[in-house]
Image (spheres, rainbow, N blue to C red):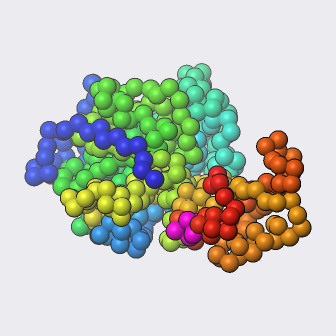
Amino acid sequence: MATHKERAAVEGDTTPGDKPQATTTTTGDTPAVTLDDVLAARKLLADVVRPTPLAWSRPLSEQLGGEVWFKCENVQRAGSFKIRGAYVRIHNLPPHERARGVVAASAGNHAQGVALAATLHGIESTVFMPEGAPLPKVAATESYGARVRFAGTTVDEALIAARAFAQQTGAALIHPFDHPDVIAGQGTVALEILEQCPQVKTVVAATGGGGLLAGLATTLRAMRPDVRVVGVQAAAAAAYPGSLLAGSPTPIASMTTMADGIAVGCPGQLPFGIIRGLGTEIVTVSEELISQALLLLLERNKLVVEPAGAVGVAALLEAAQETASGQLGSGEPRFEPPVVAVLSGGNVDPLLLLRLIRHGLAAAGRFLSLRLRLTDRPGALAQLLAELAAVDANVVDVEHGRTSAGLGIAEVEVAVTLETRGPDHADAVVARLSAAGYAPTVQ
């Protein structure tokens, strides 16, 4: 399924042919991040984070015509890359600020990163989470030592509460993305990518407020300016495309996405300045593609990834689908391989994962829901099921009703959900039933 796409790039002052430089990008009077900052962060994190592995994707490599790798930050400590930036930020606090503790706002990953980093430093932490945050993320945050409070229904609303708490108590606010130390910490992911895949040409990563993307872009522009960096947002929660077009961080009116980890209503001022200044691209992906990406990761790579962590894979999956359908023609590929997609987190609620798997199967054409009418006589349902068995369709669920006002007196309506092998098999099922005179309607 084709997705809505936005390319909102603003050209920076350097080109791929320039020599690597540890240049500084600024936003107004705010100091930004340099390669030296990222290198210092890596030294600081040497005994804190684990270098995460690269996992090769055979299906996407075959479909895109070149190597595709996954950078598995979903297996990082606390389940995401967030520990990197949180630890650097807390470590760099003056002693008198550390003594008052820290406060943060997060839907889950930054919460766990801050909680763990604070505990490693021996200080107190309070985390504000949106109402309805996944229970496993709440429990994990508490297990790392944080006190969890709930405020609002979005990360932005929780952040307002966290700021107020900081003003009332003197606790240091550990922003999830809008601080140089946080961005420098996230940039260490790029250093590992360059060591593990030195031939990389494209890096694709999830983008919410922009801290990870800004860190990747800063590091790669300084060390490998020929590497293309692409940020990916869920189309239903994409604040960056409009902000880049407007030239400044611009809030979006509403967000509805399964990718709660990147559901941020407005870009951070500092990461926005870096991303815009370096000409970093932003694309968006649909909910259907995100669920298909999760299913691909689970089935083919045996990787448990949360929706936000899978959006980069969703963008590659869309490119693969467009290549297969001939939409891209014979020109250059949308993502030049070797490609590394950052799997930014693996903290997913098991109940949500069950729903996502079903959604992914449906989006991939492997669940088929049909509605049709039968004559109300003994054996009619058995005959229908025999037709389905003959075409190897596995019945998941059947509903049998006689009370619809539109039914004839001798008719019943049947809604049946089937498991199929994919779109071609689903088409064969519909064709078989149509040939047998059932006139099925696909739901």
Compared with 29, 340 (above or below) is below
Q: Nearer the viewer, residue 428 or 50?
A: 428
| Majority secondary structure of magenta residues | helix
Q: Position of residue 376 (x, y in %)?
A: 86, 59
Q: Is residue 425 magenta?
A: yes
Compared with 428, 38 (above or below) is above
At x 68%, y 64%, the residue is 437
Q: Is residue 305 magenta?
A: no
Say whether residue 21 is left or right of residue 335: left
Say whether residue 169 is left or right of residue 308: right
Q: Quadrant of residue 56?
A: bottom left
At x 73%, y 60%, the residue is 416
Q: Position of residue 224 (x, y in %)?
A: 20, 56
Q: Position of residue 217 (x, y in %)?
A: 29, 47
Magenta range: 424-429
Q: Position of residue 13 (x, y in %)?
A: 14, 38
At x 36%, y 35%, the residue is 241
Query: Which residue is at the far right?
Result: 378
At x 41%, y 43%, the residue is 4
